[in-house]
């Protein structure tokens, strides 16, 4: 029996999580697997009542689960950064979820802002290092508050952290079995320390994966080619900061935050899956928010825990719904309610 931790979170998070769990229940019956859900009330409301972000022992408790399903984090009455650092970043770091996995896939019926491109051209995956780089939070101020102030922000990269990310990307590219091309995205011409390490490690590990073609692109050029020729890409691997930037661009070319899902992966431990969009508090409890990104996150969760058939059936259903039943991915413009959108996915499983 699978044990799944659920963090509905803030704003519309509980609404989209509800639809993802509705789909999970239907899939468990169809594909004959069993699961239990434990809900954690971590988020803005708890913080406002108790001053606590994650309770003592909370991270250790999460290690008992097969996967974590997250709705959204972000409360209008809580200063930005408190919940994001206290829940999202802490979970990613303390559970060593060292891979951020972001499929960029345009589903049928979904509009992309890129002219003359469709689902055949937009289908790639970004593997982002998730525990190091600039997000490590290392640095200092010198002469703070004076006209001679200096702010130093350190990009911290270890051989171990870089290599495990790159190896995951090679393995994922092989398993994906499409173009079998892995592109390293960096800035080797300017960031000569961190990206020297990344580039050397990439080429060394590549010797063990002779069936995978390799490529390199500067991050600025990658942003250009993602718009002009997204069909060039298969799997991309990059560091924490560059990955953060190009995956938001990826979300836009696949139709927006309303369809984008991601995973924070620890291949040897517990992983967490979430829709990419925020908590959208202005739509809370209106039953108009689009739940498809959260349902797509459930598809990733199922694939991760080994329920490949259920995951494939769910993706097929999402594609049917986007092609035939949903007018728009925008809140209030879908042509149906949040709960009705979930029902449509269940009906087409």
Image (spheres, rainbow, N blue to C red):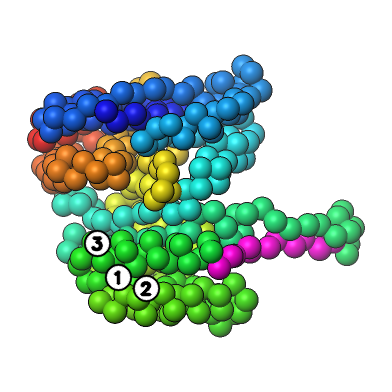
**Quarter of the picture holding the N terminus:** top left
**Quarter of the picture holding the C terminus:** top left
- Where residue 294 appears, as percent x and y from the top left, is 32, 37
| Gap in angstroms between the C-alphas marked 2 and 1 | 8 Å
The correct choice, above or below, for 196 with respect to 117 in the image is below
| Gap in angstroms between the C-alphas marked 2 and 3 | 16 Å
Instruction: Assess disc 3: are there few (<14), some (14-19) or many (≥20) residues with their C-alpha within 10 Å of its C-alpha.
Output: few
Instruction: Assess disc 1: are there few (<14), some (14-19) or many (≥20) residues with their C-alpha within 10 Å of its C-alpha.
Output: many
| Residue 157, magenta (yes or no) | yes
Residue occupying the point 40% across, 65% down: 167
First in residue order: circle 3 vs circle 1: 3
Question: Residue 105 versus residue 205: which sits nearer the camera?
Answer: 205
Residue occupying the point 44% across, 79% down: 204
In this view of the protein, can residue 282 be seen by the observer? no
Mark 3 residue element: helix
What residue span does the magenta drawing correspond to? 149-159
The residue indicated by pointer 3 is 175
Please, what is the dominant secondary structure of the magenta stretch? Answer: strand
Q: Nearer the viewer, mark 2 or mark 1?
A: 2
Question: Residue 51 versus residue 340: which sits nearer the camera?
Answer: 51
The residue indicated by pointer 1 is 233
The correct choice, above or below, for 233 with respect to 105 in the image is below
Outermost top residue = 49
First in residue order: circle 2 vs circle 3: 3
> Mark 2 near mark 1, Cβ–Cβ under 8 Å?
yes
Task: Name the mark on residue 183.
Answer: 2
Residue occupying the point 29% across, 34% down: 291
């Amino acid at each position: 029996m699978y044990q799944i931790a659920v963090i509905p979170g803030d704003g519309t998070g509980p609404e989209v999580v509800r639809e993802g769990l509705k789909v999970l229940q239907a899939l468990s019956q169809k594909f004959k697997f069993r699961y239990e859900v434990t809900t954690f009330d971590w988020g803005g409301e708890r913080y406002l009542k108790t001053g606590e972000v994650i309770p003592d022992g909370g991270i250790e408790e999460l290690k008992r689960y097969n996967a974590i399903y997250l709705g959204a984090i972000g409360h209008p009455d809580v200063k930005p950064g408190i919940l994001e650092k206290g829940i999202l970043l802490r979970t990613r770091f303390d559970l060593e979820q060292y891979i951020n996995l972001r499929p960029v896939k345009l589903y049928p019926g979904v509009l992309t802002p890129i002219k003359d491109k469709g689902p055949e051209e937009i289908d790639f995956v970004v593997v982002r290092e998730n525990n190091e780089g600039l997000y490590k939070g290392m640095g200092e101020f010198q002469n703070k508050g004076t006209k001679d102030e200096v702010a130093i922000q350190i990009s911290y990269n270890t051989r171990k952290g870089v290599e495990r990310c790159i190896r995951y990307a090679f393995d994922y590219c092989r398993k994906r079995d499409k173009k079998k091309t892995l592109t390293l995205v960096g800035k080797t011409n300017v960031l000569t320390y961190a990206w020297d390490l990344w580039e050397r490690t990439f080429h060394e590990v590549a010797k063990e994966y002779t069936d995978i073609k390799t490529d390199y692109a500067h991050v600025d050029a990658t942003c250009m080619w993602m718009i002009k020729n997204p069909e060039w890409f298969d799997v991309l691997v990059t560091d924490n900061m560059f990955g953060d930037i190009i995956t938001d661009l990826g979300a836009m070319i696949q139709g927006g935050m309303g369809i984008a899902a991601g995973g924070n992966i620890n291949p040897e431990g517990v992983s967490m899956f979430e829709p990419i969009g925020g908590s959208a508090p202005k739509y809370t409890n209106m039953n108009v928010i689009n739940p498809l990104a959260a349902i797509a996150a459930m598809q990733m969760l199922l694939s991760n825990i080994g329920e490949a058939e259920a995951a494939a059936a769910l993706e097929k259903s999402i594609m049917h719904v986007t092609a035939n039943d949903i007018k728009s991915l925008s809140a209030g413009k879908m042509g149906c309610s949040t709960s009705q959108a979930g029902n449509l996915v269940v009906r087409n499983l």
